[in-house]
Image (tube, grey):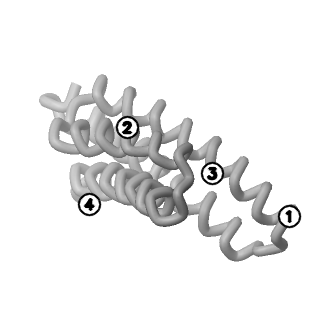
Amino acid sequence: MNYTYVRLAGLLGQALYCLCIVLIGLKQHIPFFYTFIGPAAILLFIAKFPNYYFDCIAVSTMILMVILSLIFSFAVAFFNQNYLLAFGASAFPAACLAAVLTSMGKLKESDASYT
């Protein structure tokens, strides 16, 4: 398996998640959601350059997104009883984070130019 593509898919998936949040914020006029353009830009920039230290920055950004999605999921599940949306909103960023972390470990072991 080519872990460079797994890393790229995880980073681009998380960036797409952030851009979807921004678009929802634009449509619903929620100014807080506009702040997700920053993490999307960081992840899109880092996706171009496969470097271990850049990926550490991306992982910290993705952890922040997982924490925010868990808070959102708790609120949706508790107040709206929409459990499917709550699961999807927290599972997608966690899966992207797992993909990037797995590919970081494999690339660090196998690819000398990655570190």
Q: Residue 8, percent across and down? A: 26, 52
Mark closest to the chain's N terminus, 2 or 1? 2
Name the element at disc 2. Answer: helix
Q: Which numbered disc, 4 or 1, marks the residue that appears first in the sequence?
A: 4
> What SS does tag 4 mark?
loop
**Residues at marks 1 and 3 touching, judged by CB atoms closer than 8 Å:** no
Name the residue carrying label 3: 69
Secondary element type, mark 3: helix
Residue indicated by mark 2: 38
Q: Which residue is mark 4?
A: 1
Mark 3 surroundings: few (<14), some (14-19) or many (≥20) residues within 10 A: many
- The answer, for residue 105, to whether it is visible in the render is no
Residue at mark 4 to residue at mark 1: CA–CA distance: 42 Å
Please name the amino acid that badge 2 sits on.
Gly
In this view, the mark in front (4 or 3): 3
Between disc 4 and disc 3, whose residue precedes? 4
Of the pair 6 and 12, the residue shown nearer to us: 12
Image check: 22 left or right of 93?
A: left
Q: Residues within 10 Å of mark 4 (few under 14, many from 20)?
A: few
